[in-house]
Amino acid sequence: MAQITFTQNLARHVDCPALEVDGGTVREALERYFALHPRVRGYVLDEQGALRKHVVIFVDGQQLRDRAGLSEPVRDGTSLYVMQALSGG
């Protein structure tokens, strides 16, 4: 099972408790999470199912590369950390 955790900043907008879920990829893990917490989906994914522009996911401390397919593998003990990306200069 993978542990999905969200920043407190996202939690101010929608209830998104940390949770362990099954899944072979980031997308599968997120879909299982969204099945339990459907309101979170719109804050994380856009209308095409890709990661929103100002959201970033870290998989075991490494930034997710496949923002559209979310195909990075997930194993037992994987940590997914979802946060809003900061922009500006």
Image (cartoon, rainbow, N blue to C red):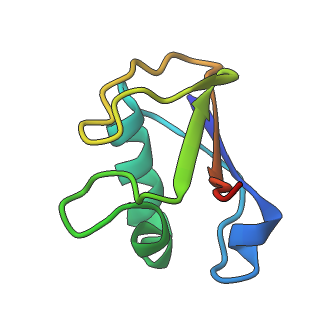
- Say left or right for 67 vs 7: left
- Looking at the rendering, which quadrant does residue 59 occupy? top right
- Looking at the rendering, which quadrant does residue 29 occupy? top left
Q: Residue lying furthest left in this view?
A: 48
Identify the residue shown where x is 67% and y is 59%: 88
Q: Is residue 25 above or below residue 18?
A: above
- Looking at the rendering, which quadrant does residue 16 occupy? bottom right
- Say left or right for 14 vs 32: right
Q: Where is residue 39 in the image (x, y as percent from the top left)?
A: 46, 79
Q: Residue lying furthest front in this view?
A: 89
Identify the residue shown where x is 61% and y is 33%: 58
Q: Which of 58 and 53 is in front in this view?
A: 53
Q: In this view, does 45 lie above or below 26?
A: below
Q: Nearer the viewer, residue 88 or 9?
A: 88
Q: Nearer the viewer, residue 89 or 63?
A: 89
Q: Residue lying furthest bottom in this view?
A: 13
- Say left or right for 70 vs 55: left
* Count of numbered tags: 0
Identify the residue shown where x is 40% and y is 74%: 42
Q: Where is residue 27 in the image (x, y as percent from the top left)?
A: 34, 40
Identify the residue shown where x is 48% and y is 30%: 64
Q: In this view, does 62 lie above or below 58?
A: above
Name the quadrant of the C terminus: bottom right
Name the quadrant of the N terminus: top right
Q: Which of 87 and 26 is in front in this view?
A: 87
